[in-house]
Amino acid sequence: MSANIPTIKLNTGALIPQVGLGTWQSADGDGYKSTVEALKAGYTHIDSAMFYRNEAEVGKAIRESGIPREKLFITTKIWPTDLQYVEETFNKSIELLGLDYVDLYLMHWPVAMNHNGNDRWYPTRPDGSIDIVDPKEWSYLDTYKEMQKLLKTGKVKAIGISNFNKERIEKLLADPEVTVVPAVEQIELHPLLPQQELVDYCHSKGIAVEAYSPLGSTGAPILSNETIVKIAKKRGVNPAVIAISWAVWRKTIVLPKSTHAERIKANLQLVELTDEEGKEIDNIHKLLGGPKRLVDPKWGIKLFD
């Protein structure tokens, strides 16, 4: 089954579907099942990550689908504890996925953590703080330069960033050794946190923007919002469709996550919002006292503005 999902052209010339399946918190069999259901429903864009611990499951579903590889857009990401070991980590990801290449490889967060610390994902110091590598020793700039080298292998079609603020992107683009503009920036985006200034900045630099947690992360607070519910009733769809359609309306790429077959399917029922509806959703955060960030790890370093 194919779905009529709009696409955006990346700065590499490749087309990326504007709706993809997010697979965060989809492990222990859920990553496989949700990817199978998504591919059946017509998704051609799947977003995974080393940190999600589901690359093997996602890859298995892709290989078993029978869908030609070139018809799919597959993303994975490198986690902070691996930022000093780009080639080694990428090779592990591609092995787990069981694919010849990925379409997009992202730096999950712009901060390196101790690879040899006391935990695989969140190493801590004796005082309980996150064991971050001194940026003077290794920074996100060093990681990105290593990621650039992967493009020459043919196993990575595009590279990008995630959870970068404007200041870090400016610093990245200003570095003389950075010769590849990121194809994508993946950030938390939803009506409570539209980040329009950052979205506009990325677009001005030719960087496409992906939205994670488009329904507001755990608990999906967006789905009960008065404005979203009102527009959903008027259009005869569920509130999630309106939130996802808003992301498409504002020319971003959206990654709704679900492990339920019916919701996975329903999330593809896009409606074309009017500009009036889109702007009404744009204003939701203002009516609720300003932007609300729902994913904000406390790692002892300023990540966001």
Image (cartoon, rainbow, N blue to C red):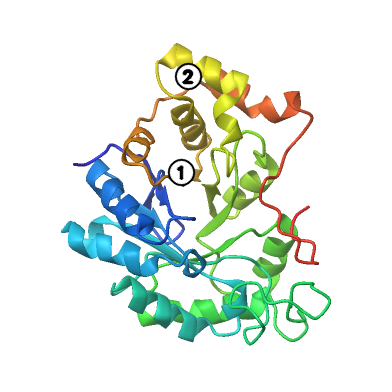
Apparent side of residue 228 relative to residue 142 in the rendered image (left or right): left
Name the residue at 52% across, 77% down.
147
**Disc 1 from disc 2: Cα separation:** 17 Å
Determine which quarter of the picture holds residue 181: bottom right
Q: Is residue 199 above or below residue 55?
A: above
Spot occupied by residue 61 in the image (x, y as percentages of width and height) = 26, 60
Residue 288, position in %: x, y? 74, 27
| Residue 53 is at least partly visible in this image | yes
- Among numbered discs 1 and 2, the one appearing first in the sequence: 2
Instruction: Give the quadrant of residue 150.
Output: bottom left
In this view, the residue in front, 207 or 134, is 134
Q: Nearer the viewer, residue 167 or 221?
A: 221
Residue at image coords 78%, 79%:
125
- Residue 232, disc: 2
Residue beneath disc 1: 256
Q: Secondary structure at mark 1?
A: loop
